[in-house]
Amino acid sequence: MTLDRFVVVPAAYVFLLRDGAPAAGGGEPEVLLQLRQNTGFMDDHWAAAAAGHVEKGETAYDAARREAREEIDVGDLVLEFVTAMQRTRGGEPIDERIDFFFSTRTWSGTPRIVEPQKCAALEWFPLSALPDPVVPHELAVLRGMIDGGVAPYTTFGFPSPGGIDE
């Protein structure tokens, strides 16, 4: 029996969170997002401030910390696991992915653009007022974080029910 197998591509994402400016009742949480450019994937979309592929022999936690250092020059992240998302694009088995999403409220350094060829802007946004457009699968996770309903395992892009697709 021949099985059609594919390689799953792992990636790690980091959402930096902070309390926003105080308002009546306290500051609303904000998330740091980057505006993608010249990457060939979702250019001109807002995305996690730091994200990238998990390298051979690296854990998703290690990849998240490495990407944060490489892309926005922050370290000492205290990561909180948000969800693992199995994702595909249009059912193309060649494009199966597993994305590990983390958030953090604790880090050292001041976030800055390290790769200006790939990042046009880096800005804080209230979770209730995200920019448009945001990379769709990342937006699904952010909405789940806002609602407090992100399951430890989620899917995106599959025709079967049970995912968090729009």
Image (cartoon, rainbow, N blue to C red):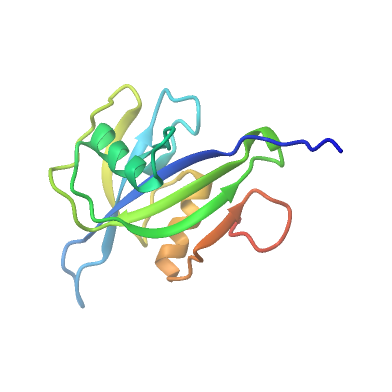
- For the residue pair 161 and 121, the one nearer the viewer reads as 161
In the figure, 49 relative to 26: above or below?
above
Lateral position of residue 99 relative to residue 21, left or right: right
Give x and y (percent) for residue 27. Answer: 20, 68
- Residue drawn 46% across and 58% down? 83
Residue at far right of view = 1
Number of marks: 0
- For the residue pair 118 and 77, the one nearer the viewer reads as 77
- For the residue pair 99 and 49, the one nearer the viewer reads as 99
The quadrant of the image that shows the N terminus is top right
Residue at far bottom of view = 25
- Residue drawn 26% across and 66% down? 28
**Is residue 126 visible in the rendered structure shown here?**
no
- Residue drawn 28% across and 26% down? 115
- Residue drawn 40% across and 45% down? 60
Give x and y (percent) for residue 78. Answer: 24, 56
Residue at far left of view = 109
The quadrant of the image that shows the C terminus is bottom right
| Image quadrant in which you'd find residue 53 | top left
In the figure, 115 relative to 20: above or below?
above
In the figure, 104 relative to 28: above or below?
above
Give x and y (percent) for residue 76. Answer: 18, 48
**Is residue 39 visible in the rendered structure shown here?**
yes
